[in-house]
Image (cartoon, rainbow, N blue to C red):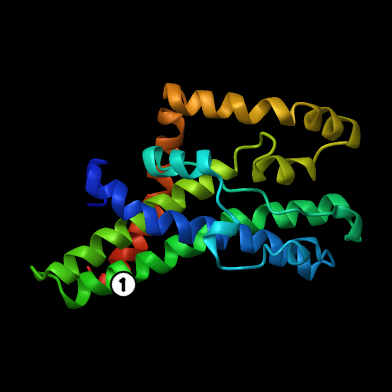
Amino acid sequence: MLFGSYDLRTMLLRLPIVFLAITVHECAHGYVAYLLGDRTAKMYGRLTLNPLHHMDIMGVLCMVLFGFGWAKPVPVNPQYFKNPKGGMSLVGLAGPLSNFLMAAIFSVLYGLLARFFPTSESFVVEFFSNLLAVGIMLNIGLGIFNLIPIPPLDGSKILAYFLPNRWYYKLMEYERYAMPVLILLLFLGILDRPLTFLQTHVFAVFWKLILLVAGI
């Protein structure tokens, strides 16, 4: 299933994982901002595990169809940070890191299933194996996609920390144009090859974790 085709069953399995992934991703942004002194996300009710508070319909659709997507951005006010650019980079990094952490947790659970039920034909074991496999790949995909350094994705906030202020403000000028272009590139399949290339190589790291836990 880890290398299976994206059929209807896979898309249905993606739904609960999508809701979990985007919820944890956005909560991670809001919680790090909260730790750095910004209570904006908390005031707007975004420090919640209710996925309905974080859903972006187009982003969820892209995640279900393509395995890459986004959620409704958590409101953050960098004026509350002692170092606004540094704070925003940490807030931006928190989202993708939360997805890679979830991918690691799912990998451990997948490895445990392989270790203790190596030849099981149980429907329950097969269902959870498939669910965990989808969870691994989808969280890797979400983490990688959001690290693209184009506004408003998280990668742009990380990149901004290393840019001079004048370059940073120039980058932000194009934020409103970037997302429609990204959506178009996704639907046209232009990003499929580079994103799949990165996803495959990052997955190789988690595959080693699965083999380690499985005792193979």
Instruction: Identify the image quadrant of residue 33.
Output: bottom right
Q: Nearer the viewer, residue 119 or 142?
A: 142
Which residue is the site of mark 1? 213
Within 10 Å of disc 1 (Cα), the crowding (few <14, some 14-19, many 20+) is: some
x 50%, y 48%: residue? 142
Q: Position of residue 147 (x, y in %)?
A: 60, 43
Asked whether residue 178 appears in the rendered view, the answer is: yes
x 27%, y 48%: residue? 10
Instruction: Identify the image quadrant of residue 153.
Output: top right
Question: Is the residue 7 above or below the residue 171 in the image?
Answer: below
Side of 196 where 173 appears, left or right: right
Instruction: Identify the image quadrant of residue 178.
Output: top right
x 66%, y 54%: residue? 93
Side of 23 where 165 appears, left or right: right
- Circle 1: element type: helix
Q: Nearer the viewer, residue 23 or 133?
A: 23
> Which amino acid lies under the numbered mark 1 shown in the image of this protein?
Val
Q: Position of residue 111 (x, y in %)?
A: 28, 69
Q: Nearer the viewer, residue 202 or 56?
A: 56
